[in-house]
């Protein structure tokens, strides 16, 4: 938060959503992976962080709506950043950094969705550089991977191949 506060030159930057602990998000995502998929309910999106003030920022996590095959074949929207990592064209998602990566969960043999999504909203440009924006998304994805202990150990690269 201090990094964003400094970049946005905003002393009034504050959390704008209810705090969700890492443990809560981890528990819910793991439960969704293990339990049978409910088509009418779908997957939840978890607001990992929301900040507002003189600038806005948000980050979300959840199981992706698109299956792996759809992501692999929709090359207009998604490009491969690493073996198990795909990044959406920022123009197609309003400037957000949206990435999905394969995350196999121990004990979830019938896992309905294997793609975990991490999305970071587009902070105020030009005060927030594309590199810093991308770094926030990479850190979110790596935290999710590590906390969920993805058994396939996806490698989230530093550079997602995004250029605006």
Image (tube, rainbow, N blue to C red):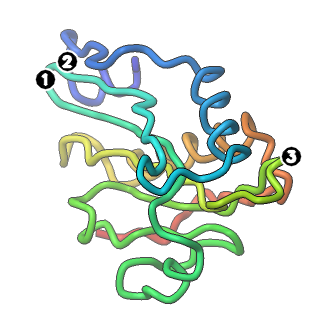
Q: Nearer the viewer, residue 30 or 13?
A: 30
> Separation of disc 2 and disc 1 at Cα?
5 Å
- Labels 1 & 3 near each other (Cβ < 8 A): no
Q: How many marks?
A: 3
Q: First in sequence, mark 3 or 2: give its number.
A: 2
Secondary structure, mark 2, is loop
Nearest to viewer (mark 3 / mark 2): 3
The residue that label 1 is drawn on is: 54
Horizontally, is 96 left or right of 22 in the view? left
The residue that label 3 is drawn on is: 107
- Labels 2 & 1 near each other (Cβ < 8 A): yes
> Separation of disc 3 and disc 2 at Cα?
44 Å
The residue that label 2 is drawn on is: 10
Which quadrant holds the C terminus? bottom left
- Give coordinates of residue 82: x percent, y percent: 66, 72
Above or below: residue 74 compared with residue 96: below
Q: First in sequence, mark 2 or 1: give its number.
A: 2
Secondary structure, mark 3, is loop
Disc 1 packing (10 Å; few <14; some 14–19; many ≥20):
some
Horizontally, is 86 left or right of 153 in the view? left
Mark number, residue 110: none
Q: Nearer the viewer, residue 43 or 46?
A: 43
């Amino acid at each position: 938060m201090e990094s964003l506060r400094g970049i946005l030159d905003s002393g009034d930057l504050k959390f704008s959503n209810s705090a969700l602990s890492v443990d809560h998000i981890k528990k819910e995502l793991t439960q969704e992976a293990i339990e049978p998929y409910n088509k009418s309910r779908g997957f939840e999106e978890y607001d990992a962080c929301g900040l507002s003030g003189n600038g806005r920022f948000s980050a979300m996590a959840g199981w992706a709506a698109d299956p792996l095959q759809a992501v692999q074949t929709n090359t207009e929207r998604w490009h491969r950043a690493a073996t198990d990592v795909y990044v959406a064209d920022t123009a197609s998602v309003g400037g957000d950094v949206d990435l999905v990566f394969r995350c196999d969960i121990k004990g979830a043999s019938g896992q309905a969705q294997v793609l975990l999504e991490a999305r970071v909203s587009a902070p105020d440009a030009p005060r927030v550089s594309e590199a810093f924006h991308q770094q926030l998304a990479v850190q979110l994805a790596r935290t999710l991977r590590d906390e969920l202990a993805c058994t396939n150990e996806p490698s989230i690269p530093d550079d997602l191949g995004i250029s605006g």
